[in-house]
């Protein structure tokens, strides 16, 4: 009997170690920091090269497109423009399609990393929420469960 | 009306508490009268909830905007169909709909089983009543759907989100709810068995079917959600590991595990604790999923907003479930001791066990990934997120191992496989796998991306074919019929086993579709008029962007010509629709060119620039994606067969081979000619009745072949008829199709050509949604309805026909049928001998 327990114990240990190793390694690559603009504004160098999900609001009127391309530049800030304390501003660049809900003052989450010229958003890395859609879309959530 | 609704909810709660209390007391005192009273009041809850639902639907139909919920999710111009489905459109109503479904399901389950499981029933009633009480309590104290405005009621409602005004979105939630709610029944029986100590295998027999039914609805619900995401959201995929999607997937994993492990308990009396645990876990996960998506604990693009009170109530309920049920399991551990031990790892029960561990691991992993952002914030204070790639990296290997087990399990014998039977059993499936692998290498398909999956698909297919073939051969020998009858008889003799194999075929097809994802292509591009872009084999040219308005919405449509090898093969019309009152949330109308090999999928991105007619579009080439939808259709058929009643196949099992063969052939003829005859009658009905002049005016029967053809090509846009074409939609009093037929008739009168008319309709209706054309290309729209249509009609037709035929042969003679289990064993042993 003890022999059997040793076998079971060893199996559990080996599987456990393998799983946690794999989990650790994939989590290291797969996770991203979720930060607000104000949290990173003063220490951009710290975040250089790290994958970050940056949360902020599009600064009205800063959104430009290079003619005949899908290259965009815009600025995001910590709080909505109409709020009392707009806070710091980060300049972002992006190539690709913008979601429907992206517009002035939209609340956005940008996936990407800081480079020398501000925040570079990766492909498909713009997620925009709009408050009304959020609420309305919740109905589809009822579908989910 | 609103106060009547609130009163009905309150009354339901009171009756529910009475039912729970009196059942427990009745069971303890062994008082038949008290138990009967409990059952009676349990039915009464169902009646009360039906009335409350009627009140709610009535409020929607009469547009009673004094009720906040109605105001929020409906408006007066909403089509009738969506007014009704708005009932479950929001959080409060969805909870109420949940209780309603649970009361219906519970009543049916109690009614069906009240004689056979007399000992268990009072506790089943008490458990289900307890769950109902929780949800009713939620509604009464916190989330009453009948809450009214205190001051003046608004004159007009806010309207349902346009994204949800979609046929599939309307039927997707009920399907998932039925799946979720259905899992409560096995849980209730499990708890009753634990309390009473009647822990032999009889409670399993009572819940097997219920679990399978709930599992089927859960699968269909998942499928509808996937296809909705694919066709409506415009990001080219169908699954993105969103918390809300995951919430529905979690109980699916554990229920799948239970459906497998229950066989081990039936055959070998092992895994008894495990099975009870799975039933409890599955139920717990349905509640947990609801909690996750409704309390704001997890952030999701489509979760309900923050609601800390709701979260607290849910947490309390979940703690009660967990401590209560696992406390019972521990208390009953001595009774749950396994009667057998695992003899060998090369046995079927071992394969089932591994399959169970992996499914449970998958559930736990998805749960972990979903909760990870919340966990990391709670532990480290920093919110770390994980996204789809993380899930895919883990779940792809898990899926592959499961696929391998799907092929291995059926090949292993119960108890212990000898070396000789391993060789016998694995020879052909392994050959199939190797041949597929060879073909993959020869065709230079990347092996690790999808090739391995293809090879495993080959292996599983080999296994299933071999199972059917060998079983059929033995049966043919024993009964002296032909092979087809023998195989049908085989399926009839053991519906669960062979229905299960058909579900395995579905799994193979679905995996093919997933593997196709490895070769997916995607391009985001801005096209000026006349400019081209090339993706895969396709070249797409922008021939202009047009804007139209139909009063309800403004539609911006891109006209894109599709070329292959320099020849134009199609024109696609992706569009953006801007609904009135919802201009800020345009809907994406994707254009898809479907083939069995791959989909060309184009979505237009906002905001379109109209001044220079340029279109920013995203083009996807999605290989094999349609096999996923076909797979779900097959899955529905397989589960349907497994669920058929006992006598359904007795004609094919009859001892008289000649009659059985005749019956089978007749059945096959009916099945094959049925659709053809149906099509014929459709055709006939079309041109058939002599119509007077005024009839032609009012219902626009086709006058020329072109008009008839176009009536079949153009799909009604009313959105409620499930994409019927405007020739068929005539049967219902549908104003939209009437108008569209009128427009078509007018164009025909102007002598327009086929393509001109199509162009006109595309421009008018703003996308190619109204084009039934893909139907003519053989596939396409079929995918929408595939599982429901094929699953339902196929299984129902087969079932009915089989029942009818079996009455004949049963009357003809028949020795008393053998016990199903003995039958199964004989079958197995015969096969092993062979």
Image (cartoon, coloured by chain):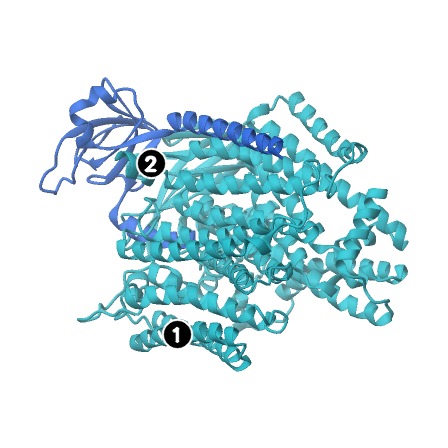
Chain colours: A blue, B cyan
Q: Residues within 10 Å of mark 1 (few under 14, many from 20)?
A: many
- Residue B16 vertical position relative to residue B309 in the rendered view, above or below: below
Residue A11 drawn at (x, y percent):
56, 30
Report how far apart the C-alphas of labels 2 and 1 lie in the structure: 60 Å
Write down the residue under mark 1.
Answer: B12
Q: Residues within 10 Å of mark 2 (few under 14, many from 20)?
A: some
Q: Residue B612, percent across and down?
A: 30, 34
- Residue in view at x 39 percent, y 74 percent: B12
Q: Give the side of residue B399 with respect to residue B350, left or right.
A: left
Judge by depth and name the residue closer to the eye, B386 or B351. B351
Tell me if label 2 and label 1 are in contact, CB under 8 Å. no
Q: Nearer the viewer, residue B544 or B814?
A: B814
Is B47 or B446 nearer to us in this picture?
Answer: B47
Specify the subunit that label 2 lies on.
B
The circle on residue B613 is 2
Above or below, comparing residue B256 to residue B71 in the picture: above
Whether callout 2 and callout 1 share a subunit is answered yes
Q: Quadrant of residue B373?
A: top left
């Amino acid at each position: 009997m003890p022999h059997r327990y040793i076998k079971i114990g060893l199996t559990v240990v080996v599987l456990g170690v393998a799983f946690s190793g794999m989990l650790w390694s994939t989590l290291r690559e797969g996770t991203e920091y979720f930060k607000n603009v104000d949290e990173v504004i003063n220490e951009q160098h710290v975040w250089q090269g790290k994958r970050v999900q940056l949360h902020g609001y599009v600064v009205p009127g800063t959104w430009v497109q290079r003619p005949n391309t899908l290259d965009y530049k815009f600025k995001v800030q910590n709080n909505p423009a109409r709020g009392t304390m707009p806070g710091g501003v980060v300049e972002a660049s992006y190539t690709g399609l913008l979601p429907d809900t992206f517009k002035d003052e939209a609340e956005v989450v940008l996936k990407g990393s800081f480079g020398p010229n501000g925040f570079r958003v990766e492909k498909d890395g713009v997620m925009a929420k709009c408050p009304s859609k959020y609420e309305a879309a919740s109905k589809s959530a009822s579908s989910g469960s | 009306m609103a106060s009547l609704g609130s009163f009905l909810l309150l009354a339901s709660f009171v009756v529910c508490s009475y039912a729970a209390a009196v059942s427990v007391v009745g069971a303890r005192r062994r008082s038949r009268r008290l138990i009967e009273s409990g059952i009676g009041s349990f039915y009464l809850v169902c009646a009360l909830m039906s009335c409350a639902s009627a009140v709610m639907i009535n409020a929607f139909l009469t547009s009673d905007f004094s009720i906040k919920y109605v105001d929020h999710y409906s408006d007066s111009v909403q089509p009738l169909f969506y007014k009704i489905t708005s009932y479950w459109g929001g959080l409060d109503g969805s909870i109420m709909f949940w209780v309603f479904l649970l009361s219906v399901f519970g009543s049916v389950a109690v009614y069906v089983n009240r004689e056979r499981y007399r000992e268990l029933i009072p506790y089943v009633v008490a458990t289900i009543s307890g769950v109902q009480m929780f949800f009713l309590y939620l509604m009464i104290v916190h989330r009453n759907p009948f809450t009214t405005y205190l001051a003046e009621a608004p004159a007009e409602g806010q309207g349902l989100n346009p994204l949800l005004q979609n046929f599939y979105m309307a039927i997707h939630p009920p399907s998932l709810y039925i799946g979720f709610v259905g899992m409560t029944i096995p849980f209730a029986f499990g708890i009753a068995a634990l309390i009473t100590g009647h822990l032999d295998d009889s409670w399993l027999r009572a819940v097997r079917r219920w679990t399978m039914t709930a599992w089927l609805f859960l699968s269909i619900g998942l499928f509808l959600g996937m296809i909705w995401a694919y066709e409506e959201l415009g990001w080219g995929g169908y699954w993105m590991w969103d918390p809300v999607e995951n919430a529905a997937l979690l109980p699916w994993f554990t229920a799948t595990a239970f459906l497998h492990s229950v066989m081990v308990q039936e055959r070998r009396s092992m895994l008894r604790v495990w099975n009870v645990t799975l039933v409890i876990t599955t139920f717990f996960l349905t509640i947990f999923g609801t909690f996750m998506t409704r309390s704001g604990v997890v952030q999701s693009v489509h979760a309900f907003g923050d609601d800390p009170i709701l979260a607290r109530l849910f947490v309390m309920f979940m703690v009660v479930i967990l401590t209560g049920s696992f406390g019972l399991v521990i208390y009953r551990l001595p009774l749950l001791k396994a009667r057998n031990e695992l003899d060998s790892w090369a046995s079927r029960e071992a394969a089932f066990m591994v399959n169970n561990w992996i499914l449970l691991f998958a559930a736990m992993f998805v749960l972990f990934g979903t909760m990870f952002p919340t966990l990391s914030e709670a532990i480290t204070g920093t919110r770390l997120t994980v996204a789809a790639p993380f899930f895919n990296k883990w779940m792809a290997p898990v899926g592959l191992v499961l696929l391998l087990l799907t092929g291995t399990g059926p090949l292993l014998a119960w108890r212990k496989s000898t070396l000789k039977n391993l060789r016998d059993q694995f020879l052909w499936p392994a050959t199939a796998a190797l041949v597929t692998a060879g073909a993959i290498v020869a065709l230079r398909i990347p092996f690790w991306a999808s090739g391995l999956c293809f090879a495993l698909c080959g292996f599983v297919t080999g296994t299933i074919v071999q199972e059917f073939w060998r079983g059929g051969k033995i049966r043919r020998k024993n009964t002296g019929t032909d092979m087809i009858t023998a195989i049908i008889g085989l399926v009839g003799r053991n519906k669960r086993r062979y229905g299960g194999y058909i579900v395995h075929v579905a799994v193979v097809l679905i995996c093919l579709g997933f593997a196709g994802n490895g070769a997916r292509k995607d391009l985001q591009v801005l096209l000026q008029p006349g400019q081209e872009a090339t993706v895969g084999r396709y070249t797409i040219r922008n021939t202009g962007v047009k804007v139209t308005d139909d009063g309800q919405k403004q539609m911006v449509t891109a006209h894109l010509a599709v070329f292959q090898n320099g020849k134009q093969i199609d024109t696609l019309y992706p569009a953006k629709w801007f609904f009135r009152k919802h201009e800020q949330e345009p809907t994406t109308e994707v254009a898809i060119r479907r083939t069995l090999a791959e989909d060309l999928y184009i979505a237009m991105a906002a905001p379109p620039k109209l001044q220079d007619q340029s279109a920013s579009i995203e083009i996807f080439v999605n290989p094999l994606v349609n096999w996923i939808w076909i797979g779900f259709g097959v899955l529905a058929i397989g589960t349907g067969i497994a669920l058929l009643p006992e006598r359904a196949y007795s004609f094919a099992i009859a001892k008289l081979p000649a009659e059985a063969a005749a019956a089978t052939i007749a059945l096959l003829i009916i099945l094959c000619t049925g659709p053809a005859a149906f099509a014929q009658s459709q055709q006939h009905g079309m041109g058939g009745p002599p119509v007077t002049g005024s009839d032609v005016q009012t219902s626009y029967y086709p006058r020329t072949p072109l008009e008839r053809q176009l009536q079949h090509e153009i799909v009604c846009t009313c959105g409620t008829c499930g994409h019927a074409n405007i020739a068929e939609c005539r049967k219902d009093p549908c104003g939209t199709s009437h108008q569209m037929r009128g427009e078509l008739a007018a164009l025909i009168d102007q002598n327009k050509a086929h393509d001109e008319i199509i162009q006109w309709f595309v421009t008018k209706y703003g996308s190619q949604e109204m084009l039934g054309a893909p139907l003519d290309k053989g596939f396409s729209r079929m995918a929408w309805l595939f599982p429901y249509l094929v699953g339902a009609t196929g299984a129902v037709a087969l079932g009915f026909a089989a029942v009818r035929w079996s009455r004949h042969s049963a009357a003809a003679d028949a020795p008393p049928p053998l016990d199903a289990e003995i039958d199964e064993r004989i079958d197995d042993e015969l096969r092993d001998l062979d």
